[in-house]
Image: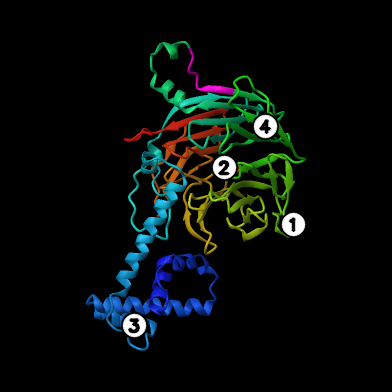
């Protein structure tokens, strides 16, 4: 779409292709219908002129007749030059996105540019297929394992259970344990993967998230509390701060800066908290809220928006400053309960999953479903909620099948199915999370176990 706008502005004349021109692109989707029709005619004329210039007069004549190009188009090389400028702008934007994530060059190479369908054509996947991952460590709780999370640097994972306990595990220690290094340190048990076990909830732990900047883990529970644990203190097993609610907590998400949090509960009303003051805010417009319990909630990496899903079957996009709903996708999964939502790294798309066993990619600028990833459910309907997610490079979409407990994966750009991966659990997968920067993911199941999956890459961070 950006390239089309550049073409239009350049063709119409009197508009220089500078930074101001590119800033105007953000308003493309607010254009009036009659303006869009006029712009598309300009685009067709540019295509016809380029075809004539390149010697494809027959094709140009056919297209000219189809779109009723009047007056006749002249031979011109404008389109090629303008597309080159647009593609260069796309490359610059991807480079800026990488720098914004504060990644070193090796990490940038490992996670890639992320998915951006506006600028991509044929992209070769460089990350390993999810079917190639292997279990390298298994940890057990005394009850069903229902929640999991990765730390922002990918060095820690956390698991939460129906037994009300939380475990924090060190990724490097899990990998060392798997490789069975026979050092004295390991033999003495000094590198046990579980570095913290936390007990401060009274009921099932339903959701976990690490603070984006500090050594703090937040947990939500059916006991209607959100707990904040400082895991930098080895002796601390209790939370240093608690948020009390009147409904069981279902989901939570930190603001990228870390000073605020959004929270979903069995109530339809979204909570927006100042973590420092524990002050709660809700939207000033009651009609903006869901009509059923909130199932998933996530901040956009750029902190402009957050997204929520609900048992009412809708997905809502919220302005993170005004706390008002700015867009609603009604019956996003044909009326089925929406189980999970998440943003892509560039904030342009939302990935959702539903109890209809469908996974969908939504484009925010056009408010439409771009890609549907199908074939995951053996029965078509799910009994329990689970999550769809991207791998670390956003080249693959992953979703666990409830009946077979196998992992379904698709190429994120063209929805082609990859080989299934048997996850080895004896119960439904209730939580799945992927490392933000490496080929590793965590599965949590009703069989009381959490499995850590890993695939070694040619280049390590």
Counting residues from the start of the chain, the first of labels 2 and 4 encountered is 4
Write down the residue under mark 2.
386
Residue at screen point 58% across, 57% down: 332
Q: Where is residue 35 in the image (x, y as percent from the top left)?
A: 50, 78
SS class, disc 2: loop
Q: Position of residue 86 (x, y in %)?
A: 37, 64
Write down the residue under mark 3.
64
- Could you give the CA–CA distance between mark 2 and mark 4, rounded to whole angstroms? 16 Å
- Could you give the CA–CA distance between mark 4 and mark 3, rounded to whole angstroms? 65 Å
- Could you give the CA–CA distance between mark 3 and mark 2, rounded to whole angstroms? 50 Å
* Quadrant (top left/top right/bottom left/bottom right) for the C terminus: top left
- Could you give the CA–CA distance between mark 1 and mark 4, rounded to whole angstroms? 31 Å
Quadrant of the image occupied by residue 235:
top right
Q: Position of residue 352 (x, y in %)?
A: 54, 51
Write down the residue under mark 1.
284
- Classify 177 as above or below 21: above
Q: Nearer the viewer, mark 1 or mark 4?
A: 1
Left or right: 410 with respect to 222?
A: left
Write down the residue under mark 4.
204
Counting residues from the start of the chain, the first of labels 1 and 3 encountered is 3
Viewer-side residue, 371 vs 381: 371
Q: What stretch is highlighted in magenta?
A: 189-196
- Could you give the CA–CA distance between mark 2 and mark 1, rounded to whole angstroms? 31 Å
SS class, disc 1: loop
- Could you give the CA–CA distance between mark 1 and mark 3, rounded to whole angstroms? 53 Å
Q: Which of marks 3 and 2 is in front?
A: 3
């Amino acid at each position: 779409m950006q390239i089309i706008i550049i073409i239009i502005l350049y063709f119409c004349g009197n508009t220089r292709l500078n930074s101001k021109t590119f800033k105007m692109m953000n308003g493309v989707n607010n254009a009036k219908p009659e303006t869009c029709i006029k712009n598309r005619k300009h685009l067709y004329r540019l295509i016809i002129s380029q075809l004539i210039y390149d010697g494809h007069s027959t094709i140009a004549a056919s297209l000219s007749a189809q779109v009723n190009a009047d007056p006749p188009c002249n031979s011109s090389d404008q389109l090629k030059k303008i597309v080159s400028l647009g593609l260069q702008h796309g490359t610059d934007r991807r480079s800026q996105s990488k720098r914004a994530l504060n990644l070193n060059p090796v990490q940038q190479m490992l996670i890639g540019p992320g998915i951006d369908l506006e600028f991509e054509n044929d992209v070769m996947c460089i990350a390993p297929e999810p079917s190639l991952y292997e279990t390298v460590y298994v940890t057990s709780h005394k009850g069903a394992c229902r929640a999991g999370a990765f730390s922002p640097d990918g060095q820690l994972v956390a698991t939460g259970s129906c037994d009300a306990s939380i475990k924090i595990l060190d990724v490097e220690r899990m990998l060392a344990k798997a490789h069975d290094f026979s050092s004295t340190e390991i033999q003495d048990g000094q590198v046990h993967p579980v570095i913290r076990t936390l007990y401060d909830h009274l009921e099932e732990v339903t959701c976990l998230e690490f603070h984006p900047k500090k050594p703090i883990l937040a947990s939500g529970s059916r006991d209607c509390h959100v707990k904040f644990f400082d895991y930098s203190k080895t002796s601390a097993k209790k939370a240093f701060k608690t948020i009390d609610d009147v409904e069981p907590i279902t989901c939570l998400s930190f603001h990228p800066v870390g000073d605020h949090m959004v929270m979903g509960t069995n109530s339809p009303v979204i909570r927006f908290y100042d973590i420092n003051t524990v002050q709660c805010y809700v939207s000033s417009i009651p009609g903006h809220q869901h009509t059923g319990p909130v199932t998933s909630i996530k901040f956009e990496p750029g902190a402009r928006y957050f997204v929520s899903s609900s048992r009412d079957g809708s997905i809502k996009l919220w302005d993170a400053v005004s706390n008002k709903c700015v867009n609603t996708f009604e019956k996003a999964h044909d009326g089925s309960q929406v189980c999970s939502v998440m943003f892509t790294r560039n904030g342009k798309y939302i990935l959702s999953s539903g109890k209809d066993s469908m996974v969908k990619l939504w484009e925010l600028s056009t408010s439409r479903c771009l890609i549907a990833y199908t074939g995951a459910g053996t029965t078509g309907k799910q009994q329990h909620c689970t999550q769809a997610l991207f791998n670390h490079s956003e080249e693959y979409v992953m979703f666990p099948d409830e009946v077979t407990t196998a992992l379904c994966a698709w190429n994120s750009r063209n929805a082609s199915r990859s080989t299934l991966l048997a996850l080895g659990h004896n119960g439904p997968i209730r939580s799945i999370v992927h490392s933000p920067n490496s080929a590793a993911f965590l599965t949590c199941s009703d069989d009381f176990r959490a499995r850590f999956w890993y695939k070694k890459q040619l280049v390590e961070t």
